[in-house]
Amino acid sequence: MDYSLKVGVLIGAARGALISSMFGAGWLGWGLGNANVFNGFVFVAPTFGFLAMLLFSCSIYFFRKGRQLRKQHPTIDGPRRKTAAKWFLLVALIEGIAIAFVSFLANHLHRADLATDWCAMVVGLHFLPLAKIFRVPRFTILGILMTLWGVACWALFHSSAIAISASIGTGILLWCWCVYSLFIARSVAQSLST
């Protein structure tokens, strides 16, 4: 694999890890907070905070390392990056509209518990086009897992348990994805240093 391509993979994996660490912390924290886990167990909140900061910090480290390497070996992929950015913004816009719609629908049905689950499914589905946009086929796996988790929560749980399980499961999936992305970044960084 070309050196500049490896640098691009490093930056992409680190960026993915950074985003999934932040959103994973949000989803997981929301679910644990709704389940009142932070109140009952003294060790949960510090452990959660430590893990969130660890994942975030590792992501930043690899992102900065990739940017530093890109400065040493610049790439010429501006048009492709601009096209990907436009498609990403379109997917993000559609995702935002879909989240607003499912939230409105859940509120209209007087089922606020379904809003969280449906939003998690929308987030999962948004990874499917991102796999093609960013040329990362493994995004499809994350998207399918998140969507299936949302469907399972809808089928298996009732009332507030739907929202809690959807939030916790989505957060765990995103954090697992973050760890996976960090392993990819670490592997690429090690191959670049040899």
Image (cartoon, rainbow, N blue to C red):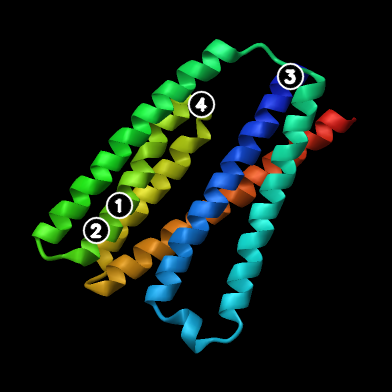
Q: Earlier along the polypeptide chain: callout 2 or callout 4?
A: 2
Residue at image mark 3: 4
Residue 134 shows which numbered tag? 4
Question: Where is residue 4 drawn, in percent x and y?
Answer: 74, 19
CA distance for labels 2 and 3: 43 Å
Type of the residue with mark 3: Ser
Horizontal relation, residue 144 to residue 162: left or right: right
20 lies above or below 107: above
Tags 2 and 1 touching, CB below 8 Å = yes
Q: Nearer the viewer, residue 33 or 140?
A: 33
Q: Secondary structure at mark 3?
A: helix
CA distance for labels 4 and 3: 16 Å
Residue 115 shows which numbered tag? 2
Question: Where is residue 163 drawn, in percent x and y?
Answer: 31, 66
Q: Residue at x 42, y 22 (%)?
A: 86
Residue 159 found in image quarter: bottom left
Q: Quadrant of the N terminus?
A: top right
CA distance for labels 2 and 1: 6 Å
Type of the residue with mark 2: Ala
Residue at image mark 1: 119
